[in-house]
Amino acid sequence: MRREDTEAVLVRLQELGMVTTAGGRAYSAADPESVVERLARLRIQGLQGEIRQVASSRHLVDDLLEDRWAGRQRSVRELERVEGIDQVLACVDELSFFTREERLTTHPGPILIAAFEEVRSSDLKYLRRGLRMRTILHARALDCPRVDHFAAELEQEGARVRGTAGVLERMVIFDRRTAVVATDPRDITRGALIVREPGLVSTLLALFERRWSQSCGVEEELPNEAERQVLHTMACVDKDETGARELGMSLRTYRSHVSALMRRLGTANRFQAALAARERSWI
C-alpha cells in the first residue's frame, strides 16, 4: 500500500477503536472482544436512529394516503366498469393496497381456480400488513379442499371467516366507501363495477352485514351439494317418493339424507327441518 493509503486506513481503524497507538509511532490491535462489542453497539445505535427517523415520517405517509383518497374522490366516477378477470384482480389489489382499516369480501363459489393462487397470496400479504378482513365463503366454495385450507390460513393470519349455504352475492368492500361487485354474479371473468356512490355503498354494506349475521363459523359442518338439494326438495314436496324422483336418486338414498339432516338440525320432522335450515341460511 502507498504510505498515504496506509495512514488513512490507520486513522479509520483508530476511529473504530480497533487499533491503538503510542504517540502516533507504534500501532497495536485492540482486544477483539471489546472491538466486536463496540462495533455491535455502534451498529445498533445506527439502526435505532434509522427506526426513529422512519417512525417520525409516518405522518407523511398517512397524509399522502389521505390526499390520494381525496384526489380519487374528486377525479373518478362514482360508477366505473372494468372488463376481464385480469383487470378485476388488478383493481382489487390496488384498492386493497390503499385500504387503511377493513376489507369485506364474499366468495359465492366456486372460486376461479385459475386465479386462486393470485387471490390467496394477495389476501395473505395484506393480512400480514395489518389489514382487518372479514370474509364469507359459500359452501360451494368450501367444497373445494384448497379453498377449505385457504379459509384456515386466513383465520390463522387474523381474518374473520364464516361460511353459508344460503344466497350470497359476489362483492368486495374497502373501508366502507368503495365496493367492487361482479357484473355477472355467475361469471366473475366477465368484469365488475367499481362503486363509489355513498348511497349504493351503504346498501351493499347493509347487505354484507345481513349475510354475515346469517352465516356461521367455517368449522361448523355445512351441508354439501347433495344435502342442499335434498333440503330444497324437502321444503317444496310432501312425499319422499316425489323428492327422490325429482332429484334422480333412489328412495333409500333420499331418506338416508333426510334422516341425517334431521339429526344435524335437531328436528323431529321434515317440516321443522326445512324451517331450521332456512333459519341457518342453508336454503
Image (spheres, rainbow, N blue to C red):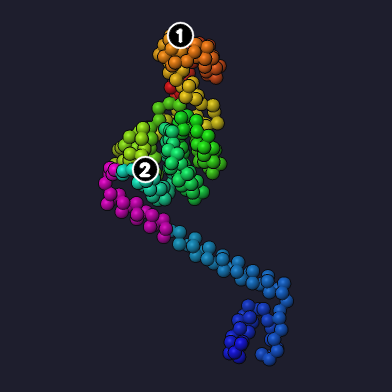
Residue positioned 52% across, 32% down in the render: 218
Residue 6 location, quadrant: bottom right
Q: Residues within 10 Å of mark 2 (few under 14, many from 20)?
A: some
Crowding near the residue tagged with mark 1, few <14, some 14–19, many ≥20 C-alpha atoms within 10 Å: some
Residue 216, disc: none
Q: Label 2 to label 1, Cα distance in Å?
A: 44 Å
Q: Secondary structure at mark 2?
A: helix
Task: Depth check: give the residue in front, 273 or 145.
Answer: 145
Q: Is residue 217 above or below residue 133?
A: above
Q: Which residue was labeled with disc 2?
A: 85
In the rendered image, which quarter is residue 283 located in? top left
Which residue is label 1 attached to? 241
Q: Looking at numbered disc 1 in the image, what kind of residue is underneath it?
A: Glu
Nearer-N-terminus badge (2/1): 2
Q: Position of residue 81 (x, y in %)?
A: 29, 43
Residue 258 in the image, given as x and y percentages of width and height = 51, 15
- Seen in the picture, residue 248 relative to 209 is either above or below; the reply is above
Which residues fall within the magenta stretch? 60-81
Q: Residue at x 54, y 37 (%)?
A: 149
Q: Amino acid at mark 2?
A: Ile
Give the prevailing secondary structure in the magenta stretch. helix
Tell me where residue 213 appears, x and y as whole percent: 45, 30
Residue 13 sits above or below residue 212 on the image: below
Viewer-closest of 80 and 31: 80
* Vertical side of 100 occupied by 240: above or below: above
Residue 88 figure quarter: top left
Is residue 159 found inside the magenta-colored segment of the image? no
